Image (cartoon, rainbow, N blue to C red):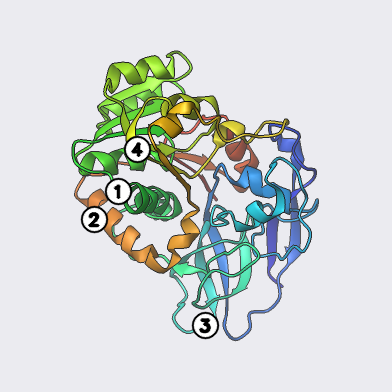
């Protein structure tokens, strides 16, 4: 009998998650049936939105077993409650796993898959194709393309969900034009760091906001951001008036809150805003707000759209293919914050929410 370890939720978070909110348990796995695989996790992804999706879990659930059906949602953290949570992107619970046993055509032993099984080191699962299914709209396991000399972990980062979360919302929704100004918050994270580089490739002036001087240095010296600021030390409106005196054309919002209010107050006529996250709010105990829309929003006739990357399921490989090309050409650089050890996954998750990571945060099992 094959055994698996899993990290379960001990209690719902009260503000910032703590390591004691999690526990490691062991379970027996069933035999592999026709159409199924047995896979062993190699890397886990830790992502900000996992914090919000905890509202859909019960104490004792695998964190985050996104495949589990829930007829009742726990209404915590989000003021927008069940309907909005149900539609949020569930592809933040990814792992890269190696197939060790297979009874499924097209999924040979030795290949790797990206799958959404939560924090568990072994899984027996059905595989196949098709659209993401409710309640969480999770895609079926995808085979990892042959990456050559590129790290396997990139399929959880720039060549995975975070990469596509940058690629499609920026290019499909905001449609930046050469010469325009693009502002990015959470710019040193897994998504924001890719957004800024794509905007630079498209001929835009790029402004990034991050939470430390070290991150600002990385954005400017390594990633080619034209301007970068530590929002903890610099007034956002003052920084934008300095870097973009004529205003911002495109705002890629990863954080929400007061920073976003300030950016929207400094945008140009008919500016475009895409919201894919609100990390500044995820640990708040009080009722959450995305942003206070300034009068500028009306006066400048701005357009704002929220985006969960699952909507681009049918175009997934398009994004990964282009991002891979840019990485190989050296046009997009990446950085990973790697935590080693299954038992250290909660610590990596907590550190990521505190902004300790550069680029993508992953756990290597």
Q: Earlier in the sequence, mark 4 or mark 3?
A: 3
Nearer to me, 354 or 343: 354
- The reply to whether callout 4 and callout 1 are in contact (CB within 8 Å) is no
* Disc nearest the viewer among 4 and 1: 4
Q: Position of 70 compared to 121: left or right?
A: right
- Distance between mark 2 and mark 3 Cα atoms: 30 Å
- Residue topped by disc 2: 325
* Disc nearest the viewer among 2 and 4: 4
Q: What residue is rendered at 35% in x and 42% in y?
A: 195
- Distance between mark 1 and mark 2 Cα atoms: 20 Å
List x then y, in percent, for residue 267: 36, 29
Q: Position of 198 compared to 45: left or right?
A: left
Query: Of helix, strand and loop, which one carries label 3?
Result: loop
- Residue topped by disc 1: 175
Q: Is residue 101 above or below residue 229?
A: below
- Residue topped by disc 3: 104
* Disc nearest the viewer among 3 and 1: 1
Other-residue count near label 3 (Cα within 10 Å), few / some / many at <14 / 14–19 / ≥20: some
């Amino acid at each position: 009998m094959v055994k698996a370890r899993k990290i379960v939720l001990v209690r719902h978070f009260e503000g910032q998650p703590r390591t004691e909110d999690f526990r490691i348990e062991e379970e027996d796995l069933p035999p592999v049936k026709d159409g199924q695989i047995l896979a062993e996790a190699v890397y886990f992804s830790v992502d900000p939105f996992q914090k919000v999706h905890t509202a859909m879990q019960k104490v004792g659930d695998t964190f985050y077993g996104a495949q589990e059906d829930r007829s009742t949602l726990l209404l915590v953290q989000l003021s927008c409650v069940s309907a909005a949570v149900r539609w949020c992107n569930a592809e933040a619970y990814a792992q890269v796993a190696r197939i060790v046993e297979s009874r499924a055509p097209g999924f040979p032993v030795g290949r790797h898959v990206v799958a959404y099984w939560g924090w568990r080191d072994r899984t027996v699962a059905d595989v196949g194709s098709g659209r993401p299914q409710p309640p969480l709209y999770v895609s079926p396991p995808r085979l990892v393309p042959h990456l050559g000399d590129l790290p396997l972990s990139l399929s959880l980062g720039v060549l995975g969900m975070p990469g596509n979360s940058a690629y499609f919302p920026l290019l499909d929704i905001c449609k930046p034009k050469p010469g325009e100004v693009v502002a990015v918050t959470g710019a040193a994270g897994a998504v924001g760091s890719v957004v800024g580089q794509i905007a630079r490739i498209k001929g835009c002036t790029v402004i990034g906001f991050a939470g430390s001087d070290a991150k600002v240095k990385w954005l400017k010296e390594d990633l080619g951001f034209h301007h970068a600021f530590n929002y903890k030390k610099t007034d956002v409106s003052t920084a934008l008036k300095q870097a973009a005196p004529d205003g911002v054309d495109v705002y890629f919002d990863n954080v929400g809150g007061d920073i976003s209010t300030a950016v929207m107050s400094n945008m140009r006529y008919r500016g475009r805003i895409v919201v894919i996250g609100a990390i500044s709010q995820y640990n708040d105990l009080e009722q959450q707000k995305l942003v206070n829309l300034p009068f500028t929003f009306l006066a400048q006739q701005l357009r704002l759209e929220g985006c969960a990357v699952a909507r681009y399921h049918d175009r997934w490989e398009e994004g990964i293919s282009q991002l891979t090309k840019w990485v190989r050409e050296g046009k997009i650089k990446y950085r990973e914050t790697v935590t080693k050890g299954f038992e250290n996954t909660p610590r990596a998750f907590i550190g990521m929410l505190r902004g300790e990571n550069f680029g993508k945060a992953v756990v290597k099992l």
